[in-house]
Image (cartoon, rainbow, N blue to C red):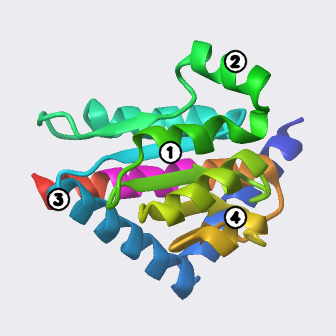
Amino acid sequence: MKKEIIKIITESIELKNQVILDDLLLSNLHSSIIIITEAILAGKKILFCGNGGSAADAQHLAAEFSGRFYKDRKALPAEALHCNTSYLTAVGNDYGFEFVYSRLIEGIGNEGDVLVGISTSGNSINICNAFAIARDKKLKVIGFTGKSGGKMKDWCDVLINIPSINTPRIQELHILIGHIICEKVESNLF
């Protein structure tokens, strides 16, 4: 059992080391920080979406912005799009689950807002549909995915694709990258 635990931790460490050496990923991380900082300075909002564990990550990161990260400061305009269960179940029932995020972007997304979609595969159709509407409405689009970027990569202004196909390890890096963005945006603004 101890060896298996050490193996899992070692895999996580090795993936983090790969990220440290990935100049494109680090450049995209920097771009994400700039895009989000500039959007907030312009009075725009940050919207997050994901499914399953990635929905939990979306909600977690939205809370870091709208609540606080390190500093006591004013709330920042951020929201996870899946938190209204009445909306989610109505649209899922009436139109299909693949439209739950795109209809929200159609309704509340404004030019200059930022949409962050989180999917380990990069192939979540409801996120791809939201990205398509977001691009039409001139939102900035940031995708958090796994190695290939999946179908989402074609819709992103910035792609944070973790170099792995292992879902738990990808999710661990998504939250690390998300925390880095929160920390740097907060320090840029305050």
Amino acid type at mark 3: Ala
Residue of label 3: 42
Q: How far apart are marks 1 and 2 (CA)?
A: 16 Å
Q: What element carries label 3?
A: loop
Task: Classify residue 41 as left or right of residue 12.
Answer: left
Rendering coords of residue 113 (x, y %): 35, 55
Q: Can residue 17 be seen in this view?
A: no
Residue of label 1: 105
Q: What element carries label 1?
A: helix
Using the image, tell me which numbered label, if any, was put on residue 89: 2
Task: Classify residue 151 as left or right of residue 134.
Answer: right
Amino acid type at mark 1: Ile
Return the disc, 2 or 3, that comes first in the chain's sequence: 3
CB within 8 Å, label 4 to label 1: no
Residue of label 4: 152
Rendering coords of residue 55 (x, y %): 62, 35
Return the disc, 1 or 2, that comes first in the chain's sequence: 2
Q: How far apart are marks 4 and 1 (CA)?
A: 16 Å
* Disc 3: CA contacts within 10 A as few (<14), some (14-19) or many (>=20): few
Q: Which of marks 4 and 1 is in front?
A: 1
